[in-house]
Amino acid sequence: MTTSIYIHIPFCKSKCSYCDFISFTKNNYDEYEEKLIYEVKNCEQLKNVTVKTIYIGGGTPSLFSCNLIEKILSQINFSPEIEITIEANPESITHEKINFYKSIGINRISIGLQAIQDNLLEILGRAHNFQMFEKAYEIAAKTFDNINIDLMFGLPKQNLEDWSKTLEYVKKIKPQHISAYSLIIEPKTKFYTERENLQLPDENTEREMYEMTKEILAPDYYQYEISNFAQQKKFECQHNKTYWTLENYLGFGVAAHSFFNGVRWNNTNDMQKYLTQNNFRENIIHSTPKSLMEEFMFLGLRMNCGVNKNIFQQKFGYNIKDIYGRQINLLKQKNLLTEDENSLYLTDFGMNFANYAMSEFILD
């Protein structure tokens, strides 16, 4: 049996205006490290499994000391060949950290740039400016040959020219992987409270930005998922593909989510409860065949390769069209979905309406 692992480091210097992730500015790193190690050591599901990928996310994991990251990884048995990713913000990247990450087996780094315009970074509440990113990327690229850059479009006061310049710049520096996400205004964020006054691009402009992303990044990058682009297949994010193909993953840390053998749960969002109690797992849900089929469909359709019909039948014991024939025909008629002998996948046009198309596979 295999599993992927997510490790949540929920600390940030400050909270970005758009961020709804569970993160804290209070520095109680030592207590958190101790509890993380306890959680990993005592995880029954982690016994007798092969770890496929490890992803250290946040928050800002690069705020954690290198020794703390090493101690956490030392609790996990993994082969040197697996993908281990750490997220890092430009302002916290140093030569020493990058070299240490490499020495303990981390082989992929994800750097949050978002935009190259300092005025947009300031609006987002980012702790770095463009010059800091340039320096950080130069440091990382000397050591890592698998780097992801995170970008965002649809930002307040962002226009098509801003987005074009960001894409052209990132394409020029040639990271192996690019993630380009559309801004979503989430409740409980600063942007949500200010939403009436945000000067956001209209829907048509945002759609143009998405099309521009694919046009500018091609042919140096190919799109393999709605928001993700890679130079080569070996640079696709293996950890994220675990989520999209409904495979096992175990989450460690406050607010981390897990899915293992058809059972979902999440750790508490309450830091004090996480640090002081051992029964911090919440919302334990045993998936039904119906819910698993739904998730398999709408997660699989995120990827350009789509949903494999044979794997659907192997997993669930049904021909995919016996379950979803009506939905497939409807979406094909609307030019949102197409198929070949092996797979169902969204058309280029369908990618623009992915949420609608995927929602059709939620059974009544």
Image (cartoon, rainbow, N blue to C red):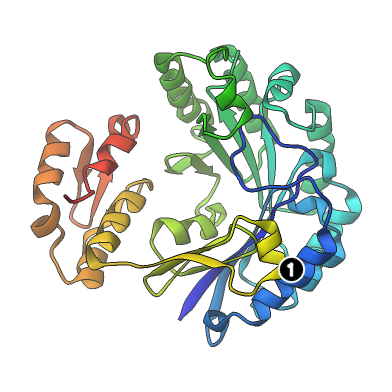
Q: Is residue 340 visible to us here? A: yes
SS at circle 1: loop
- When the figure is inspected, residue 83 is found, relative to residue 10, above or below; the finding is below
List x then y, in percent, for residue 217: 53, 31
Residue in the foreground of this view, choosing between 49 and 212: 49
User: Among all residues in the image, which is located at the extreme right?
Assistant: 96
Kind of residue at badge 1: Gly
Q: Quadrant of residue 47?
A: bottom right
Q: Quadrant of residue 268?
A: bottom right
- When the figure is inspected, residue 199 is found, relative to residue 259, above or below; the finding is above
Quarter of the rendering occupied by the N terminus: bottom left
List x then y, in percent, for residue 133: 78, 34
- When the figure is inspected, residue 109 is found, relative to residue 282, above or below; the finding is above
Instruction: Answer left or right for 146 relative to 160.
Output: right
Instruction: Answer left or right for 235 relative to 32.
Output: left
Residue at position x 45%, y 58% from top? 243
Q: How many numbered badges does the structure rendering display?
A: 1
Q: Which residue is mark 1?
A: 105
List x then y, in percent, for residue 123: 69, 21
- When the figure is inspected, residue 171 is found, relative to residue 274, above or below; the finding is above
Q: Is residue 107 visible to us here? A: no
The crowd level at tag 1 (other Cα within 10 Å; few <14, some 14-19, many 20+) is some
Residue at position x 12%, y 57% from top? 323
Instruction: Answer left or right for 102 relative to 356.
Output: right
Residue in the foreground of this view, choosing between 140 and 66: 66
Residue at position x 56%, y 80% from top? 46
List x then y, in percent, for residue 288: 26, 67
Instruction: Answer left or right for 228 relative to 312.
Output: right
